[in-house]
Image: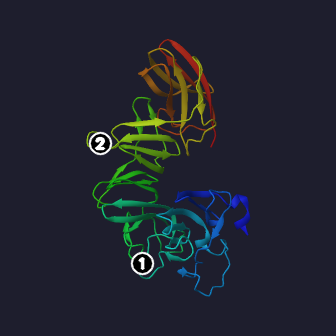
């Protein structure tokens, strides 16, 4: 079974609560360690045809992730040593005895359904006297009637409130009563208890001239008034308080290989304009410079001007973006292209390969 195959045991989530380590791993489901990872015990969740299991039941089933979507682990959240939530490809599960007995909630539940059966993230919001458990729901396949969205419960799953139906959410986080939801199209923020959300889809660092090109938000971590955002295109943070509105000023941190004066490179290279843009990396060693960047084809025909005489502050690595289109906004064909960077009166050349 894939439950014992290394390649099928990607760990998606981990949490330590009261010196107990909980992890959710794809084919191995949910596992628990009381010695901080030296040894693990597999936690048995209900199979797809049952909505609960306990030691008092007479049970006969296999722990088989091929046959049971509820045995495919994605998320885990321990409120304390007894209350533990587990998200799978078959729903969300609750244990109130430290992982021995379980109750399952899915879109097929009669009394307390959730939006979607594929639960990839769980988080807790402590709001005054209430303790909310939030989950992100994904649609499993076209055959089921489940859907994307987010749900929360204030009574341990007896009832669920559904929000943002049809929105593919990846992560939920909170700063007191403010709700942040990371989606495939940006960050949704609500300061009115989820009655309405504002979408922030563009993250741009004015100081570094960096831009997050992919709006997919994978993680969110508030630290006091600083809200950290994890993306597939870098790490970003912004301030959210009464003095500075969320998203008005972004700071982006990206991994890159620094260059010396008169050096440049472009990445990803080769690149496919259908799927991505390419970043042209260079460095300004003076206090500032006027920057122009032009793209040429292999025959040295001028294809596009990226920036023209813009002022950039110096003593730092810089990046400009080309989307793979010409001056007529048409996608360029496959081939070798050259780019020329003009820094004041100096020129630097680089090469780009476009390959669909």
Q: Is residue 129 left or right of residue 266?
A: left
The location of residue 209, given as percent across then percent down, is: 44, 30
The location of residue 70, given as percent across then percent down, is: 58, 72
For the N terminus, give its image quadrant. Answer: bottom right
Residue at 54% from the left image edge and 57% from the top image edge: 16
Along the line of sight, the residue nearer the viewer: 13 or 109 = 13
* Local SS, label 2: loop
The location of residue 230, given as percent across then percent down, is: 49, 46
Residue on which the image places disc 1? 112
Residue density around tag 2, few if under 14, some if 14–19, many if 20 or more, within 10 Å:
few
Distance between the Cα atoms at labels 2 and 1?
Answer: 37 Å
- Quadrant of res 203: top left
What's the mark number on residue 245? Answer: 2
Residue contact at pointers 2 and 1, CB within 8 angstroms:
no
Along the line of sight, the residue nearer the viewer: 195 or 337 = 195
Q: Is residue 25 left or right of residue 75?
A: right
Residue at 56% from the left image edge and 46% from the top image edge: 275
Q: Is residue 228 above or below residue 43?
A: above
Residue at 67% from the left image edge and 74% from the top image edge: 64
* Local SS, label 1: loop
Q: Is residue 184 above or below residue 159?
A: above
């Amino acid at each position: 079974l894939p439950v014992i195959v290394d390649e099928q045991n990607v760990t998606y989530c981990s949490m330590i609560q009261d010196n107990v380590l909980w992890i959710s791993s794809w084919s191995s489901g949910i596992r628990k360690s009381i010695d901080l990872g030296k040894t693990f015990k597999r936690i048995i969740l209900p199979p797809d045809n049952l909505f609960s299991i306990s030691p008092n039941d007479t049970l006969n089933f296999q722990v088989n992730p091929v046959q049971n979507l509820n045995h495919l682990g994605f998320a885990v959240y321990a409120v304390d040593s007894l209350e533990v939530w587990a998200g799978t490809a078959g729903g969300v599960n609750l244990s109130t005895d430290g992982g021995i007995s379980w109750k399952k909630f899915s879109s097929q539940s009669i009394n307390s359904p959730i939006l979607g059966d594929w639960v990839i993230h769980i988080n807790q919001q402590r709001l005054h006297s209430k303790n909310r458990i939030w989950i992100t729901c994904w649609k499993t396949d076209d055959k089921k009637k489940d859907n994307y969205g987010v749900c929360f419960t204030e009574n341990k799953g007896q009832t669920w409130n559904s929000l943002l139906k049809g929105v593919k959410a990846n992560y939920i986080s909170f700063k007191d009563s403010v709700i942040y939801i990371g989606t495939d199209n940006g960050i949704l923020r609500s300061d009115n208890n989820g009655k309405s959300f504002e979408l922030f889809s563009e993250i741009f660092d004015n100081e570094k001239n960096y831009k997050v090109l992919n709006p997919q938000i994978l993680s969110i971590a508030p630290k006091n008034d600083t809200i950290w955002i994890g993306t597939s295109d870098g790490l970003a943070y912004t301030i959210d308080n009464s003095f500075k509105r969320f998203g008005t000023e972004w700071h982006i941190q990206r991994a890159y290989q620094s260059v010396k004066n008169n050096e440049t490179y472009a990445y990803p290279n080769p690149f496919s304009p259908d799927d991505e843009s390419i970043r042209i990396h260079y460095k300004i060693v003076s206090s500032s410079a006027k920057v122009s960047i032009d793209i040429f084809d292999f025959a040295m025909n001028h294809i596009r001007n990226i920036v023209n005489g813009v002022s950039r502050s110096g003593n730092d690595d810089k990046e400009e973006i080309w989307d793979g289109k010409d001056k007529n906004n048409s996608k360029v064909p496959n081939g070798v292209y050259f780019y020329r960077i003009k820094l004041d009166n100096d020129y630097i050349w680089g090469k780009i390969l476009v390959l669909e």
